Image (tube, rainbow, N blue to C red):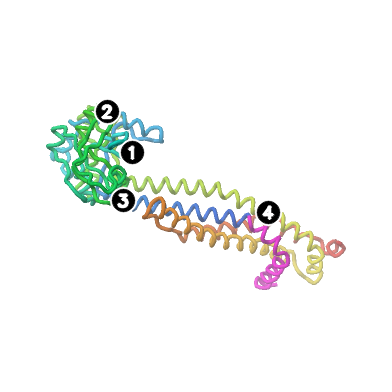
């Protein structure tokens, strides 16, 4: 009996009990659908983040205080670490120390709300050079102007706001020249950034930027920075620039052992690799959790196939009586199990693709406008490979039981 004929018999046997066959493959279908969605959404998230990082520029280097975080609880420590100072900025800006650095911009994070005539809004506030966003994020001014180094030296209370902040506080009214309040200090708006949306890790529309000196003196009461952003000359000089930054800061902080660094340096190319690793690990973990449904589905297939073997005992006896070998009987029932899981896997892949596409549309509409649908070919191969394996593993025992039936006992079975 050839494979083609065996498949025909297997298909007819499954067609006889449509409802039972459907319920049998349901567990496999759900498991494959969930895994496909995990892989597709993980790939979409990875593409989104990497696109944002590439928009930031591969020549970007970030210097932060403290030890490099190894978990969420470590992140807060970088905000309260005082290891990065104005003196460090001056040393890094010397060409003799870091010759390949084009621009070095210090920033501080300013928590809290902004208010205007009783209206309050919570933006993302930074103390730093607003021209960094204009020049490197392609975020032009809608109106007004940016503040200068002179404003920073004079501790001027001026601010540049994003388009969303303007709408929340002023509606369609003119924002230029108006005073907003940050904590108990008034800041005059001298510029409004054009609508730009999310770029890399910043939502430009939701920004409020003030001079870092003013933020340190009047808002935070600190004399250190939360972050330096360094722009290397080009991507090829990033590694050399990182080495120079580390050497300069270690010399300034009198650190001999790199293990005792009170700062850490991250390049966006390195961050991209880390993000890919994290997302791949998370996707694999979630997929393995969801794969429990496949095991449940596989057990269901095995149970139904055992029932089928019992129900078709006389059929097995007749086949053996007319010359069918144990190998052919085993092949027949194994093919039925594989066909069941294959159908469940195929439908699961199609359904997973459709649901992933719909979820991607929703995310693009309500979360991130540049979220794109991604359904890797490897996911399809994985889905079909796993379902075939489930069919073989969980169909092997029932097929073996069928093959071992004695033809005489089978013919006597009622």
Residue in view at x 66 percent, y 64 percent? 335
Q: Which residue is mark 1?
A: 122
Q: Which residue is mark 2?
A: 82
SS under mark 3: loop
Q: Callout 4: 10 Å neighbours few (<14), some, many (20+)?
A: some
Q: Main secondary structure of the magenta part?
A: helix
Part of the protein shown in magenta? 1-26
Foreground: 206 or 173?
173
Q: Quadrant of the N terminus?
A: bottom right
Q: Callout 1: 10 Å neighbours few (<14), some, many (20+)?
A: some
Q: Earlier in the sequence, mark 2 or mark 4?
A: 2
Viewer-nearest of discs 1 and 2: 1
Q: How far apart, in angstroms, are the residues tagged by discs 3 and 1?
A: 17 Å
Q: Are marks 4 and 1 in contact (CB under 8 Å)?
A: no
Q: How far apart, in angstroms, are the residues tagged by discs 1 and 2?
A: 25 Å
Q: Which residue is mark 4?
A: 300
Q: How far apart, in angstroms, are the residues tagged by discs 4 and 1?
A: 53 Å
Query: Would residue 242 appear left or right of 47 to someone viewing this image?
Result: left
**Residue 43 % position (x, y):** 43, 54
Q: Which residue is mark 3?
A: 197
SS under mark 4: helix
């Amino acid at each position: 009996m050839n494979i083609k004929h065996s498949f025909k018999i297997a298909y007819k046997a499954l067609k006889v009990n449509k409802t039972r066959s459907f319920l049998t493959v349901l567990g496999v279908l759900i498991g494959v659908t969930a895994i496909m969605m995990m892989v597709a959404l993980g790939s979409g998230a990875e593409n989104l983040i990497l696109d944002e990082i590439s928009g930031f520029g591969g020549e970007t280097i970030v210097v932060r205080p403290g030890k490099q975080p190894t978990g969420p609880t470590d992140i807060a420590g970088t905000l309260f670490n005082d290891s990065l100072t104005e003196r460090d900025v001056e040393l890094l800006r010397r060409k003799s120390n870091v010759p390949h650095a084009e621009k070095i911009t210090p920033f501080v994070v300013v928590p809290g709300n902004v208010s205007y005539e009783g209206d309050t809004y919570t933006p993302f506030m930074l103390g730093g050079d607003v021209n960094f966003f204009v020049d490197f994020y392609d975020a032009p001014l809608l109106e007004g102007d940016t503040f200068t180094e002179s404003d920073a030296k004079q501790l001027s209370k001026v601010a540049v706001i994003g388009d969303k902040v303007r709408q929340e506080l002023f509606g369609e009214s003119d924002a230029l020249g108006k005073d907003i309040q940050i904590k108990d200090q008034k800041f005059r708006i001298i510029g409004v950034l054009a609508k730009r949306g999310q770029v890399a890790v910043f939502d430009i529309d939701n920004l409020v930027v003030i001079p870092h000196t003013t933020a340190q003196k009047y808002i935070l009461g600190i004399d250190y920075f939360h972050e330096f952003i360094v722009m290397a000359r080009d991507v090829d000089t990033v590694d050399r620039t990182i080495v120079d930054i580390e050497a300069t800061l270690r010399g300034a902080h009198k650190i001999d052992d790199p293990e005792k660094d009170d700062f850490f340096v991250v390049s966006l190319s390195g961050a991209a690799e880390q993000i890919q690793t994290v997302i791949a690990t998370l996707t694999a973990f979630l997929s393995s959790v969801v794969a429990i449904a496949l095991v449940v589905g596989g057990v269901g297939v095995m149970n139904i196939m055992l029932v089928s073997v019992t129900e078709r005992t006389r059929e097995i006896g007749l086949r053996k009586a007319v010359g069918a070998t144990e190998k052919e009987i085993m092949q027949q029932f194994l093919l039925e199990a594989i066909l069941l899981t294959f159908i469940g896997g195929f439908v699961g892949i199609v359904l997973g693709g459709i649901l992933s596409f719909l979820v991607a549309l929703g995310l693009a509409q309500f979360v991130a406008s540049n979220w794109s649908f991604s359904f890797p070919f490897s996911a399809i191969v994985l889905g079909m490979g796993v379902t075939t394996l489930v069919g073989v593993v969980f169909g092997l025992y029932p097929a073996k039981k069928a093959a071992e039936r004695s033809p005489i006992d089978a013919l006597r079975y009622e």
